[in-house]
Image: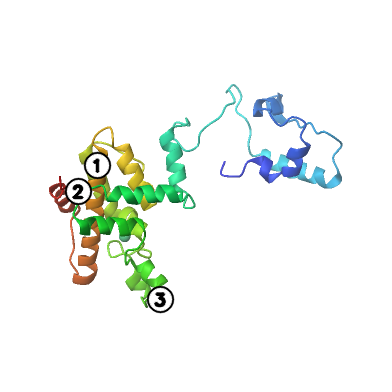
């Protein structure tokens, strides 16, 4: 059911409910093959509260329990209905309001400088993580006049070009990360936020490669994606996913 829990939809009734801990199985009974909900209230209901019960009963009439099946909890974020850390992370990462604490951001930024990549490469990755690159959304924030057409991503021509889109969410860029993860031999749930992506990429791949190596791969990828974006936007040049992945592999400074 894609609805709020009933205790939030009918807070007054939940408050008046005699036993808030009962399972569905304990909330009614089968009468001649038909399920009937049974409610116990702490006191006699007022007229308007009875109206709420009617609304609740009307809603519940569309949800009949299955006879012969055990009542239990299901974790909706995974296909199997079972809680996993990966699925929980996926839910959190997809929530745009989840912003890492300032200390985490600083730690992430410091990590970029630990890579052996040339200075210009590290600066690009650092500016990407600080959202200081001249992406179209940032230029618009600085009152640079850009038309709606010009502000769209050059790769897929959909939506305003932002750091998260340009380096993570653009379909072509997703293929780049897929290819890199395949090469490195690990898979991660890709967050929709660039800082979270850096953290998850460099931490989750640690069993396969050293953290320093993963940071270098990430930093190099960001730099090359930004290069390709500029060549595409200003020189009209196209680029191929597999060729970019090969270039990343060839540029890993040791
Ligand atoms: Zn795009």
Residue ID at (36%, 52%): 194
SS for dot 2:
loop
Q: Are marks 2 and 1 in contact (CB under 8 Å)?
A: yes
Give the quarter of the figure containing the N terminus. top right
- Depicted 190 relative to depicted 87: above or below: below
Q: Which residue is mark 3?
A: 143
Q: Relative to residue 78, is residue 71 drawn left or right? A: right
Quarter of the rendered structure image containing ligand 1: bottom left
Residue ID at (41%, 70%): 141
The one of 191 and 32 positioned closer to us in this rendering: 191
Whether the residue carrying mark 1 lies under 8 Å from ligand 1 is answered with: no
User: What is the CA distance from the residue labelled 2 to the residue labelled 1?
Assistant: 9 Å
Residue 161 location, quadrant: bottom left
Q: Which residue is mark 1?
A: 212
Q: Residue furthest left?
A: 250
Residue ID at (27%, 39%): 211
């Amino acid at each position: 059911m894609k609805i709020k829990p009933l205790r939030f939809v009918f807070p007054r009734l939940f408050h008046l409910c005699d036993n808030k801990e009962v399972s569905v199985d304990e909330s009614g009974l089968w009468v001649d093959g038909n399920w009937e909900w049974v409610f116990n209230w702490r006191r006699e209901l007022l007229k308007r509260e009875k109206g709420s019960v009617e609304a609740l009963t009307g809603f519940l009439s569309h949800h009949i329990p299955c006879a012969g099946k055990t009542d239990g909890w299901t974790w909706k974020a995974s296909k199997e209905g079972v809680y996993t850390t990966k699925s929980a992370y996926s839910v959190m990462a997809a929530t745009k309001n989840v912003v890492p604490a300032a200390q985490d951001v600083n730690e992430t930024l410091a990590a970029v400088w630990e890579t052996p990549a040339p200075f210009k490469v590290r600066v690009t990755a650092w500016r990407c993580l600080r959202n200081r690159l001249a992406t179209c959304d940032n230029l618009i924030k600085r009152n640079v006049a850009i038309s709606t057409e010009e502000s769209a991503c050059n790769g897929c021509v959909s939506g305003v070009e932002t750091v998260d889109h340009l380096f993570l969410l653009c379909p072509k860029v997703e293929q780049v990360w897929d290819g890199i993860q395949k090469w490195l031999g690990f898979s991660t749930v890709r967050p929709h936020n660039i800082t979270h992506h850096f953290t998850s990429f460099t931490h989750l791949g640690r069993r396969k490669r050293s953290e320093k190596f993963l940071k270098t791969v990430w930093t190099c990828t960001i730099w090359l994606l930004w290069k390709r974006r500029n060549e595409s936007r200003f020189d009209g040049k196209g680029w191929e996913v597999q060729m970019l992945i090969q270039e990343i592999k060839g540029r890993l400074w040791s």
